[in-house]
Amino acid sequence: MAHEKYDNKLAKLNGYIVTAINGSDIVLPSTKENAKKYGGPILKK
């Protein structure tokens, strides 16, 4: 398994592998610069 192969590189706390899942959302302005950097269409109001 991956954790056995990379055990010495994994972040651990009290011997447990540290993992995280974040369900946050962020709304970016619909600009040409953001569309170029992050992809997606430019939406008009």
Image (cartoon, grey):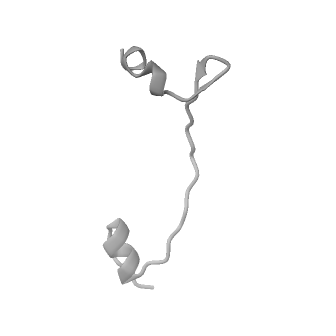
What is the quadrant of the C terminus in the image? bottom left
Residue most toward the right? 14
- Which image quadrant for residue 39? bottom left
Where in the figure is residue 42, as x and y percent of width and height? 35, 78
Relative to 9, residue 4 above or below: above
Q: Residue at x 32, y 68 (%)?
A: 40
Q: On the rendered structure, is 44 left or right of 26?
A: left
The percent position of residue 13, horizontal first and vertical second, equals 65, 24
Say which quadrant the N terminus sits in.
Answer: top left
**Horizontal placement of 10 versus 32: left or right?**
right
Residue 37 x %, y %: 35, 70
Numbered disc total = 0
Image point 56% across, 46% down: which residue?
Answer: 23
- Between 3 and 41, the one lying in front of the other is 3
Q: Is residue 32 above or below residue 21?
A: below
Q: Is residue 22 above or below residue 2?
A: below
| Image coords of residue 34 (percent x, y) | 40, 75
Which quadrant of the figure has residue 14?
top right
Residue that protrudes farthest toward the bottom in the picture:
45
Which quadrant of the figure has residue 7?
top left
Q: Nearer the viewer, residue 41 or 38?
A: 38
Q: Is residue 38 above or below residue 10?
A: below
